[in-house]
Amino acid sequence: MFKNAIVKTPSKSLVKGITTANLGFPNYEKAIEQHQKYIEALESCEVTVKILDADENYPDSTFIEDVALLTPKCAVITNPGAESRNGETAGLEEVLKGYYLEIEKIESPGTVEAGDIMMVGSHFYIGLSKRTNYDGAQQMIQILEKHDLTGSAVELSEMLHLKTGVAYLENNNMLAFCEFLDKPEFQKFNLIEIDEDESYAANSIWINNNVIVPKGFPKTKNKIEALEYKVIEVDVSEFQKLDGGLSCLSLRF
Ligand code: CIR
């Protein structure tokens, strides 16, 4: 069960965020409204939400998931592979000290963005992407092992981050899209196939037996409801314009 979540308020500079989406520029006011609804959805899952102030220097900093991996045993501050995002980790240690005694760090030349990391019990799958390199993944695995956890690397060829295309919903259930459906390491899970036209909904999040799903993806919603989860829909269209999904918008631990 998760007890806490940390989110970071979107900055006005959001429009300058990195994107490949081709969906137009995000609207700041609408992004703030959607972010507020997202916080309310988290709270309805019985987690206490800490809200960090916006940082205008970093357009993508609302995607706070990428800058830390928060496990039941330790916190790891990552080293984002996107140059414009690399400084987003500043100040994070102070915040995390409020929750963790042990705070580890990924060091260059290793890079990691934690959108590439999926927790399945005490094991962590680490996607090797344009943002997370081999060195970073190895550092992460060593840190996890030091804390009696395990990790393994997963090759990615098409997605931005591992969790862009796969989500673990606990109870052996995993949403998977495209390249992840055939991964040998995921065959032991009950794979729920996400259709091509709903690929964005592969980034849904499990929180304490609720699953938050992006609004507007009815087939995925029905498939998750059929597994008897309580589904909460949240509209995150402004963040989709920046390749960001539901998981990217919070740290849950
Ligand atoms: C980026 O490209 O870094 C942001 N525009 C989106 C980050 C999304 N984060 C995630 O998937 N964990």
Image (spheres, rainbow, N blue to C red):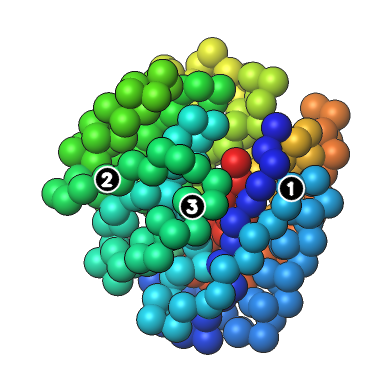
Q: Is residue 53 above or below residue 192?
A: below
Q: Residues within 10 Å of mark 1 (few under 14, many from 20)?
A: many
User: Measured from the top left, where is residue 120 in percent x and y?
Assistant: 54, 25
What is the quadrant of residue 227 in the picture?
top right
Cα–Cα span, label 3 and label 1: 16 Å
Helix, strand or loop under label 3: helix
Question: What is the number of the mark on residue 47?
Answer: 1
Cα–Cα span, label 1 and label 2: 27 Å
Pick out the residue farthest to the left. 109
Helix, strand or loop under label 1: loop
Closer mark to the observer between disc 3 and disc 2? 3
**Residue linked to disc 2:** 106
Q: Look at label 2 and name its amino acid.
A: Ile
Q: Residues within 10 Å of mark 2 (few under 14, many from 20)?
A: many
Reading the chain from its start, which is encountered first: label 1 or label 2? Answer: 1
Q: Cβ of disc 2 within 8 Å of ligand 1?
A: no
Asked whether disc 1 touches disc 2, contact meaning CB atoms under 8 Å apart, the reply is no
Q: Look at label 3 and name its amino acid.
A: Leu
Reading the chain from its start, which is encountered first: label 3 or label 1? Answer: 1
What is the quadrant of residue 125 in the picture?
top left
Reading the chain from its start, which is encountered first: label 3 or label 2? Answer: 3
Pick out the residue farthest to the top. 188
User: Measured from the top left, where is residue 217 in percent x and y?
Assistant: 73, 52
Closer to the camera, 83 or 54? Answer: 54
Q: Residue at x 39, y 24 (%)?
A: 147
**Residue linked to disc 3:** 96
User: Measured from the top left, where is residue 106 in percent x and y?
Assistant: 27, 45
Q: Look at label 1 and name its amino acid.
A: Val
Q: Cβ of disc 1 within 8 Å of ligand 1?
A: no
Q: Residue at x 45, y 40 (%)?
A: 101
